[in-house]
Amino acid sequence: MRRKTVLVNDRMQRGYRYVLTAPVGAQFDPRFKPQLSPKEMLALGVFGGVYLRDCVNEFPKDWFKRARFQKDGVYRQDRTLNHFGVRASQPLSVWRQKGWIYRDDPRGWFQWYCRYYQGRRLPEEDERQIRRWLNMKRHVRQLKAHCRAGDETCQPRRRQALLHWAYDSRKW
């Protein structure tokens, strides 16, 4: 694979560069098995429609064709744009306070995942984020223990949160 350098200039990063060293959607850590691609997540509705709207130059344009986004100029989440119709995320300020934000990915886990999916590899940060993703399995276990298979109305907030982490509870 030929290496490619990506230059980022959006609302949260100016002049940030990273190198793609793995093929798109491939060569993931063997423990990391997301059930949804970033494109699928955006089309289903995540983060109230306000996430990545200004990143269309960084990622493939087809990711954004069916993305469920809030109207331009509106920066408040709209829970109705989320697949399960509920709000299931905390403000970025909480993420920062808890130390969940890495300097290269100021938007958090999903931004890391989009860049990882595209082929960026940062070994230490990849390990940290994959561990965080693996920790979400406790919510999968809870959902399976307390909800009937196929009942999307059971625990919609937990289901939406799992969707934000590329787990697809519609399949269970």
Image: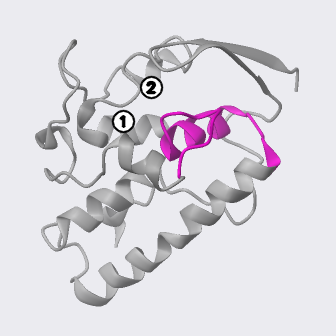
Which residue occupies 79% across, 51% down? 124
Q: Earlier in the sequence, mark 1 or mark 2?
A: 1
- Mark 2 neighbour density, 10 Å: few (under 14) some (14–19) many (20 or more): some
* Residue 51 falls in image quadrant: top left
Disc marking residue 79: none
Residue numbers of the magenta segment = 100-123
Question: Is 102 one of the magenta-colored residues?
Answer: yes
Q: Amino acid at mark 1?
A: Leu
The quadrant in which the N terminus is found is: top right
What residue is pinned by disc 1?
Answer: 42
| Residue 37 in sight from this viewpoint | no
Which residue occupies 80% across, 17% down? 4
Q: Is residue 104 left or right of residue 21?
A: left
Instruction: Judge by depth and name the residue closer to the eye, 149 or 157.
Output: 157
| Residue 87 in sight from this viewpoint | yes
- Mark 1 neighbour density, 10 Å: few (under 14) some (14–19) many (20 or more): many
Q: x, y percentage for residue 20?
A: 77, 27
What residue is pinned by disc 2?
Answer: 63
Q: Where 50 sits versus 37, above or below?
A: above
Q: Amino acid at mark 2?
A: Trp
Q: Where 67 sits versus 135, above or below?
A: above
Q: x, y percentage for residue 157?
A: 21, 63
Q: Where 163 sits versus 20, above or below?
A: below
Q: x, y percentage for residue 41?
A: 39, 42
Instruction: Judge by depth and name the residue closer to the eye, 129 or 104.
Output: 104
